[in-house]
Image (cartoon, rainbow, N blue to C red):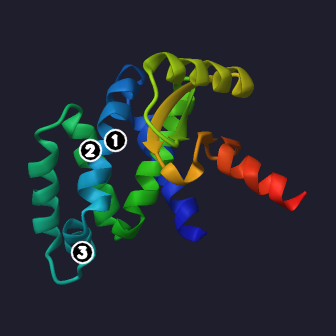
Amino acid sequence: MRDNVIAKRYAKAALQALPMDKHTEALNQIHLMREIFADSEEIKKMLVSPFVKKSLKLDFVDSVTAHVKNSEFWSQVIKVIILKNRSGITKLFFTELEEMLYDELGQRKIDLIFAHEHSEETINNVKKEIEEMLKTGVVLDIRIDKEIIGGFIAIDKNKVIDASVDSHLKKFATS
């Protein structure tokens, strides 16, 4: 719980340091930053290790961030996290920052789970329905999960829309 509060505080500070015209760009890069600094087990271990000199960690951050847009922003943000010995919150930080960036752009990220592949038209129709229900623009992260049999499940941080065949069958079986 405490890590969530700290990650949110760091994300808010980072968002304030990022010019408004760079929000979309940062949102496009956040997946890559999360993949490198939070999802890679080897890099996570190196960043939290007390046996690796901070100067080596900071040099590593510079070498990685030098190759992306907004390199100065990403370098500074990640360096602050390392210098404050908060490398353990990196994944939470990226999640919070992503959410805040979407909010700033008037959108919400939705995990949309289908049982199988669908046409672009079907996906757009589902997207429109979700946007009408949530009364905001949405960005979809589409996944396939054959266990839901058919239909879809839409998930955001506050709401789950379960229109799957699997959930309907379970409801039918219990009534």
Disc number placed over residue 32 in the picture, else none: 2
Q: Which residue is mark 3?
A: 45
Of the two numbered discs 1 and 3 on the same chain, state the one appearing first in sequence: 1
Tell me if mark 1 has few (under 14), some (14-19) or many (20+) residues whose alpha carbon lies within 10 angstroms of its own.
Answer: some
Q: What element does badge 1 sit on?
A: helix
Above or below, 117 relative to 123:
below
The structure residue drawn at horizontal position 49% and vertical position 15%, both measured from the top left corner, is 121
User: Real-space Cα distance between discs 2 and 3?
Assistant: 18 Å
Of the two numbered discs 2 and 3 on the same chain, state the one appearing first in sequence: 2
Q: Is residue 79 visible?
A: no
Quarter of the view holding residue 81? bottom left
Q: Is residue 13 visible?
A: yes
Amino acid marked by disc 1: Ile
Quarter of the view holding residue 26? top left
Q: What element does badge 3 sit on?
A: helix
Q: Which residue is mark 1?
A: 30
Residue 37 placement (x, y as % from top left):
26, 57
Query: Going by the picture, which residue comes out furthest to the right?
Result: 175
Amino acid marked by disc 2: Leu
Tell me if mark 3 has few (under 14), some (14-19) or many (20+) residues whose alpha carbon lies within 10 angstroms of its own.
Answer: some
The C terminus: image quadrant: bottom right
- Taking the image as shown, residue 68 lies to the left or right of residue 161, namely left
- Taking the image as shown, residue 68 lies to the left or right of residue 32, namely left
Q: What element does badge 2 sit on?
A: helix
Label 1 close to label 2 by CB (< 8 Å): yes
The structure residue drawn at horizontal position 19% and vertical position 38%, both measured from the top left corner, is 71
| Depth check, front residue: 74 or 134 | 134
Amino acid marked by disc 3: Lys
Residue 22 placement (x, y as % from top left):
35, 25
Tell me if mark 2 has few (under 14), some (14-19) or many (20+) residues whose alpha carbon lies within 10 angstroms of its own.
Answer: few
| Depth check, front residue: 136 or 96 | 136
